[in-house]
Amino acid sequence: MRLVHLSDLHLGFRQYQRLTPVGINQREADVAASFKRAIDKVIALAPELVLIGGDVFHSVRPTNPAILHAFSQFARLRQALPNTAVVMVAGNHDTPRTAETGCILRLFSPLGISVVEGAAQRVELAEHGVSILAVPDLPSGLPALTPSPDARYNILLLHGEVQGVLPETARQLDRATIEVPKEDISPDKWDYVALGHYHVYREVGPNAYYAGSIDYTSANPWGEMREERMAGLHEELVGGKGIIEHDLATRQHTFHPLPVSRPLVDLRPIDAGGMSVDELNATILQRAETCPGGIDDKVVRLVVRDIPRHITRELDHKMLRELKRRALHFHFDPRKPDVVRRSASGAPMRRPSLADTVRDKLETRVLSAELPRDEFVALGLKYLAEADALALATPAALASNVGESVGEAEDE
């Protein structure tokens, strides 16, 4: 009895502002292509059971293209494998927070997919002697997680966070879901535990696994890549995503890697301490130009550590805009030197002013390639100065200044 376990499809995920030639967000199209490859692999493996661990869509109200693509791919799966059972639970991204809003996953029930949302449900596959306790995202709390005493094989399919598994950064950035103590799951009581929510493939206990996502769709893909490297999963320009194949009889377990649609490249960080502006500009360009296969159409991050504020201001921003134009997304991540205190109390320098803080934020904000950063920063500081002046003005002058500022803003 072989099963395939996949999760966290996040269809409809959107990121950045690039569009395909037909007007669809490029990252949404990337994730759709990754899902098609996952379905291709499931069909090739031809298991007796497919388990989908939730977060099929990225939002409770996905776009029409995402819905149509999901329906067509699940229909293709059911047509190719008519005797394969498919069981799906709703994840926290699929679950509406209001009672009057229906769950979009019900759309797939007419295809013959067992959709479990709103409450836990036991799905019986009598012909295989399999009992599946399917537990969707349940903000109100978990049911008793107990296997069926009459089944040959017991499976727990659950979308949630097993305590102590997710790193703190992942827990803070994602939408809240149910939290489950590992002892409540008791993996040793089940023949297989299929988990969804965490985007990195991981073994939680005997026969208990997170399948991970099929593409990089979290708020912190760089953290995911770091975890995948630590687990020996990530390959440059390929990624560390995939699906699980598991045999209930032999307990043979295989993680099948699947290539992501668009490479994410974390360039080797730069330590800018002691560098001149010209040296740093040259090093940034060298990092980009030596990226395997180039940076064009990829999602790229470059961290620059220990870079003083004045060096950031004087960088070749025309070069940076050109790098951002070439990549699908180029995340330039400058990080200021750590402030070292000279005594147990107080600071070695003056407290930064509001203007300093605003300037720092504007200088590191991600911009489109067409927007000149110098003009963007100057305009922000101009508005801040006008706001300071208005705060000190008399009521009569205040009314006059507001009118002038509005007129100037409309002209710009």
Image (spheres, rainbow, N blue to C red):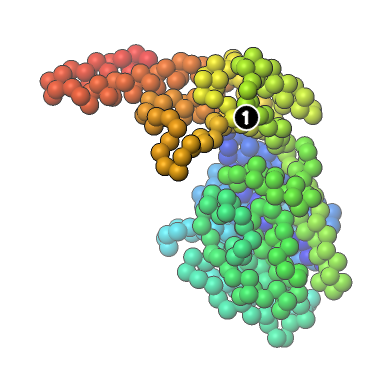
For residue 411, above or below residue 121? above
Residue closest to the far bottom? 149
Residue pushed farthest front?
343
The quadrant holding residue 358 is top left
- Count the marks: how many? 1
| Residue 411, x across and y down, in percent | 34, 13
The answer to which of 213 and 279 lies nearer the viewer is 279
Up-down relation of residue 374 to residue 112 (above or below): above
- Pinpoint residue 205: horizontal percent, then vertical percent: 72, 68
Categorize mark 1 by other alpha carbons within 10 Å: few (<14), some (14-19), many (20+).
many
Q: Residue 109: x, y in percent?
A: 62, 62
Residue 181: name its quadrant: bottom right
Whether residue 116 is visible here, answered yes or no, is no
Amino acid under label 1? Val
Q: Position of residue 143 (x, y in %)?
A: 55, 76
Give the image quarter of residue 253.
Answer: bottom right
Q: Residue at x 72, y 86 (%)?
A: 150
Q: At x 59% / y 51%, what residue is drawn? A: 170
Query: Of helix, strand and loop, which one carries label 1?
Result: strand
Considering only vertical position in the picture, is 336 above or below 325? below
Q: Quadrant of the N terminus?
A: bottom right
- Of 367 and 266, which appears nearest the observer? 266
Q: Which residue is mark 1?
A: 304
**In this view of the protein, can residue 320 be seen by the observer?**
yes
Quadrant in which the C terminus appears:
top left
Q: Residue at x 12, y 20 (%)?
A: 396
Residue 113 relative to residue 409: left or right: right
Please report the residue visible at 38 percent of the width from the left and 25 percent of the height from the top: 355
User: Seen in the image, is 387 located left or right of residue 251?
Assistant: left
The residue nearer to you, when weighing 384 against 180, is 384
